[in-house]
Image (cartoon, coloured by chain):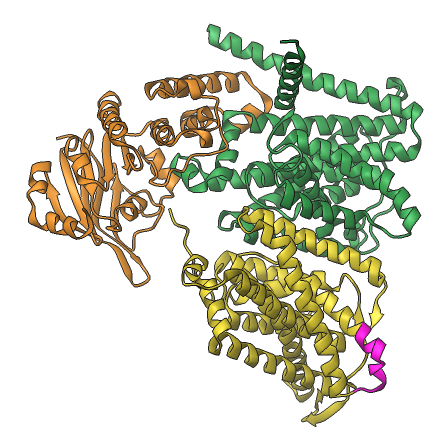
Chain colours: A yellow, B orange, C green
Amino acid sequence: MDQSSAQEFIQHLINGISLGSIYALIALGYTMVYGILQLINFAHSEVYMVGAFAAYYTGKGLGLDQHPGFGALFALLLAAVVVCSILGVTIERLAYRPLRKAPKLNILITAIGVSLLLQYSGQIIFGADPKLFPEVIKDVTVFQLGGVEVRSLDITILVVGTLVMIGLHFLVHATKIGTAMRAVSSNTMVARLMGINVDQVISFTFVIGSSLAGIASVLVGLKYPKIDPLMGMLFGIKAFVAAVLGGIGSLPGAMLGGVILGLSEEMVVGYLSSTYRDALAFGILIVILLFRPSGLLGSQTREKV
Amino acid sequence: MSEVLLEATNMKMQFGGLCAVDGFNLTLRSGELVGLIGPNGAGKTTCFNCLTSVYKPTEGVVKIRSVDTKRLRPWQISKLGMTRTFQNIRLFRDLSVLDNVIVAGLQHTRHSLLDSALRTPRHFIEEARLKERALELLAIFNLQDKAHLQSGGLPYGEQRRLEIVRALATEPRLILLDEPAAGMNHSETEELMKTIAKIRKDFHLAVLLIEHDMKLVMGICERIIVLDHGVIIAEGTPSEIQSNPTVIAAYLGTED
Amino acid sequence: MTTEDRVARFKSLGSIPAPMAAIVLLSLVGVLLDTSANPYTQFVMLLILTNVVLATSLNLVNGFTGQFSLGHAGFMAVGAYTSAWLVTRPELSGMPDLVKFLILPIAGGALAAVAGLIVGLPSLRLRGDYLAIVTLGFGEIIRVVLLNSEAVGGARGLYGIPSAQAVPELGLSPFSAQFLVASVWSVITFVVLWRIVHSAKGRAFLSVREDEIAAEAMGINITQIKVRAFVISAFFAGVGGSLFAHSVKYLNPSTFTFTKSVDIIIMIVLGGMGSFTGAVIAAAIITVLPEMVLRELQQLTGVDLRMVIYSLLLILFMILRPSGILGTREAPELWRSLRDFFQRRSVSEKPQ
């Protein structure tokens, strides 16, 4: 490998990790809800889409693209997190909770319904045309390392992503509500018998998962500034693939899966062809489900006979 | 001596760190009626699941009519002539009583799906036979009048009986009954035990019967195996078992 | 020949007239539409037949076998593209036009069935939502492959796909010829699927839906059943795709997205998963609703409310009436319960 191709490789590596950490943030939301409700929350990708629009309108309303910087970034993140949390909890409350005892398939169909409802209402409310996300962080080359450009956006994404994941780890492992979440996830009935308010924990899970989607939406908006109401569909499914890849229900798995998916997509685009980029995720999905359905870090479950 | 239908040698089933069944040995010959008893959680149902290939035993060999079942799926076990009922009734709830039995008889029909799609003469011949035989079986268990009712709507006792009818429709040589009397009252249970003895004679069946209540199987089984914590702690005739101190000790802690 | 054989042969012959009558009846409807309806209504009627094929075929997998496929649009795409590609082949130019269009769906269906086999294989190990997401993935992969296949137009798609031409000998106009093709195939689809499900053999599919473990214990090879369900369902999805191609005369990979699969799912959810009658009724409603009713609404409000209304319906049905309009009931049962209902009313109205 000569020097320029090595540089190119490292450049793809950085891009891949940065994309991957966004996938990871969304994958975490899927995996947390799946861990607790055994539901593929199809609407999660639309929560993420709505987050992007919340940030967009906040940025536009406050004129934040005129005052780029970390304050502006924080404002966008806050707006996205608040709106996404409210939306996530509302969806759970109105659409999923009435079906708590229904067959799993019915809830899945409902989730698809909610997802479509948000997509198409989004087209009506926000308009179907792509909007330009406010550029609150100027994308400049921060430093060069042996010909590899390290850009401010990638650093922002990595820093925010890492901080959020560390925060999540702390929340899940060192707080009372985190312990309750783990308890509900491992056995809902026992958790209920132990006096845990399961409904509350589920709502909280939706708050956290949706907040992560909100944060991801801002990061995506920065990196790929065109946002539209259908932006969540494919991106969301890919993030779900990342969650399956890592092992659904496993938080470290979602992070790992996200990074692996981001990296492999970037490599396919870099070295093969960008048209097959979207098929890659599904290829990975099929292979993983065929050969290791529990994912890289997941645990096997067995049906009781 | 009569043919060996089922032979389990040193069968072991481990779930993670938990050893649910450890070193299970059993030889069952045609026409035998053997009871498998033990306190709750002794591993009886796990044994059934291993014998019927629902679970793959961690160790050991299971042979049905001399065929090693290691690589066989549960439906192939059924084709070898061994079938089962389930402790927690697993009927096809939305299907009619008759259809439940018909599905179990499918493996003995000679028409294909294409015959049915095209409604060839063979379809009508085979399906008529299948239905006729299913109704005969239902009649033995007094369920013929309910043939067209939805099976999930039957009273509990009838659902248990239907499970046995359904199992018989696979034309087994050996049937594994998993707590067939669970949830039944005393007279229902007695009735059921009589029926089991009767079908065993009429169909030349071997029966392996799981029962939680020891007293119940004493009357009809020739041989009883007692399982506790996944291990066989005793084996013998009912009278031997009744006087076995290990068995009494195992049951004292858990039974009233 | 025994009496039993004779009875069977008689019954077998007796199963022929009903589908024939249905085809004749539908063709008459076609001739009627040809003279009385405008081209747009005619087009919608063709779409109804196409959607009946798609909905009933998906119902075999989702409603009767209890698997959840989200990739029906993928199989449909395979059938549509196969048919659209074949129809222009010079090798087929010698064939009488109507015959060609009657057998093109077989080709589309066959290739789709192969795709169904490939998708069906992973379903051996997966269930529930995992299977759903894999079928979704396969559907998308099929679409991406089409997008990259220049032979079928790639992203531009295929334009001006021929459809059946007039057959003066039979008094058929181009529309009534195409309608005849669609009628024949929707009747075949309905009858074959109905007969499969309503036979002892077909009860095996339902047993897998009800309880896989029990079905397997009763000697049902559940793997084989699931694969068969996928292959048969995909075959007819391909047939539906072929009808679709020659009805709309234009194909584009973006027609066959996940949303198209969901369209078909909405039909069977509304009609009742596990009811062919329901699938047919819902297919008709869902086809007519956007084209005729929502179009007005859209012109009034200026926005496309179609999918908003669909998705709301989907959610509300799942919460309020998850069994759909008909549940698992079929036309004969409906007829019986309607009759009982009116009899009871007439009885209760009698003076005491």
- Whether residue C148 is visible here, answered yes or no, is no
Percent of width and height locating residue A117: 74, 54
Percent of width and height locating residue B74: 37, 41
Vertical order, A260 against B67 (above or below): below
Decide if residue C223 is on the left or right side of residue C329: left
- Whether residue A228 is visible here, answered yes or no, is yes
Residue at image location 46% in from the left, 34% down from the top: B92
Q: Please state which of residues A200 and A169 is positioned toward the viewer in this rendering.
A: A200
What residue span does the magenta drawing correspond to?
A57-68
**Where, by quadrant of the figure, is residue B34 drawn?**
top left
Total marks placed: 0
Decide if residue C212 is on the left or right side of residue A15: left
Q: Quadrant of the N terminus of chain A?
A: bottom right
Q: Please state which of residues A21 and C187 is positioned toward the viewer in this rendering.
A: A21
Dominant secondary structure of the residues highlighted in magenta in the image: helix
Percent of width and height locating residue B33: 19, 32
**Where, by quadrant of the figure, is residue A115 drawn?**
bottom right
Decide if residue A101 is on the left or right side of residue A233: left
Residue at image location 65% in from the left, 82% down from the top: A160
Vertical order, C159 against C56 (above or below): below
Vertical order, B51 against A90 (above or below): above
Residue at image location 36% in from the left, 46% down from the top: B54
Percent of width and height locating residue C242: 75, 38
Residue at image location 60% in from the left, 50% down from the top: A98
Is residue A67 a member of the stretch shown in magenta?
Answer: yes
**Where, by quadrant of the figure, is residue B31 drawn?**
top left
Is residue C38 a member of the stretch shown in magenta?
Answer: no
